Image (cartoon, rainbow, N blue to C red):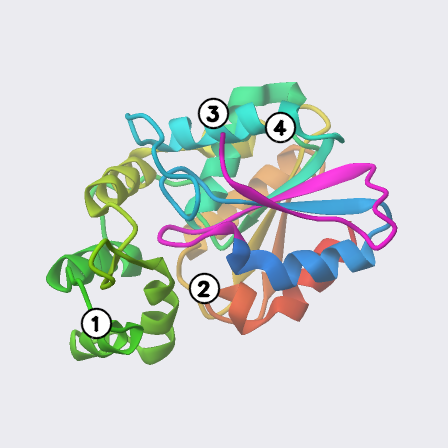
Amino acid sequence: MLHHDVIRPDDGDVAGWLLFTHGIYGAGRNWNAVARKVVAERERTGAILVDLREHGGSVGQPAPHTIEAAARDVADLIPTLDAPVAGAVGHSFGGKVMLMLVRLLGSDAPREVWIIDSTPAARATPAGSAWDMLGTLRAAPGPFASRGDAVARLEALGVETATAQWVSTNLERDADGRLAWRIDLDVMEELLHSFFAEDLWDVVEAPPADVTLHFVKATESSVLDDDSVRRIEAAGRATGGRVRLHEVAGGHWLNADNPEGVVAVMAER
């Protein structure tokens, strides 16, 4: 079972859950601030912050490590919750996992699905910041005497300080008391290969009845290119508005760059 943290409204009364999933190298807690604000804005709504397979507390999941396997993990979690899942949110890698969840569950999928700066498109050759980070982490295998040493090593390899500090949350103490990477880089590579190989435009262009897909594009990010934006907008017209595009100012890491902007568009729904 996937590790997850639970956020309930002050009175504890939950009629529906929102699932939050994260990007590669992340954890559900990355979306804690946004989730708490959305819960405060929406009556009788709670949030489940999910650690996807081999991230955070969800280690030891069986191979193969694919987008489909990650989505099936989430599908297995849903029936164990004490209220229906009304919506699902996925950032970056998690966005594609949520699209796969819709493909798997069909008409049983959450009614509102939010894909935060993620693409349904496949790519022939892996590339981008997440792929580059994999090489960087292989060049900085550790262990490290302190978190500061790990951050300094990543900075020396060209990683920005804020990103290095965030990635360093994946460190844990080993048997000798030193800090080592908790994430398995071979598994991360397998997940990324699956991410780039998977094409989920069929879900976007023909979503199940009563399911609305909300794509959130970060204005300073190129993850959703112009062709993808046009294709999403065309899907919206063809489905009577069940595919929607929202733009939020900020870079790819909208949960850090502009959490209030994300909360604003989500609270409307």
Neighbourhood count class around disc 1 (C-alpha, 10 Å): few under 14, some 14–19, many 20 upward? few
SS at mark 2 in the image: loop
Q: Amino acid at mark 2?
A: His
Decide: is 52 above or below 117.
above
Q: What residue is pinned by disc 3?
A: 72
Q: Is residue 139 visible?
A: yes
Q: Earlier in the sequence, mark 4 or mark 1?
A: 4
Q: Earlier in the sequence, mark 3 or mark 1?
A: 3
Residue found at x 22% / y 64%: 178
Q: Could you tell me residue 180's position as x and y percent? A: 23, 58
Q: Could you tell me residue 131's position as x and y percent? A: 24, 54
- Cα gap from disc 2 to disc 3, whole angstroms: 26 Å
Query: Viewed as shown, does residue 138 lie left or right of 95?
Result: left
Q: Earlier in the sequence, mark 2 or mark 3?
A: 3
Circle number at residue 176: none
Residue found at x 59% / y 71%: 258
Report the span colored magenta.
1-28
Q: Does residue 13 belong to the magenta stretch?
A: yes
Q: What residue is pinned by disc 1?
A: 145
Number of numbered labels in the structure image = 4
Neighbourhood count class around disc 3 (C-alpha, 10 Å): few under 14, some 14–19, many 20 upward? some
- Cα gap from disc 3 to disc 1, whole angstroms: 38 Å
- Cα gap from disc 2 to disc 4, whole angstroms: 27 Å
Circle number at residue 78: 4
Q: What residue is pinned by disc 2?
A: 252
Query: Viewed as shown, does residue 267 lie left or right of 222?
Result: right
- Cα gap from disc 1 to disc 2, whole angstroms: 31 Å
Q: Could you tell me residue 121's position as x and y percent? A: 38, 41
Decide: is 211 above or below 105.
below
Decide: is 193 above or below 105.
below
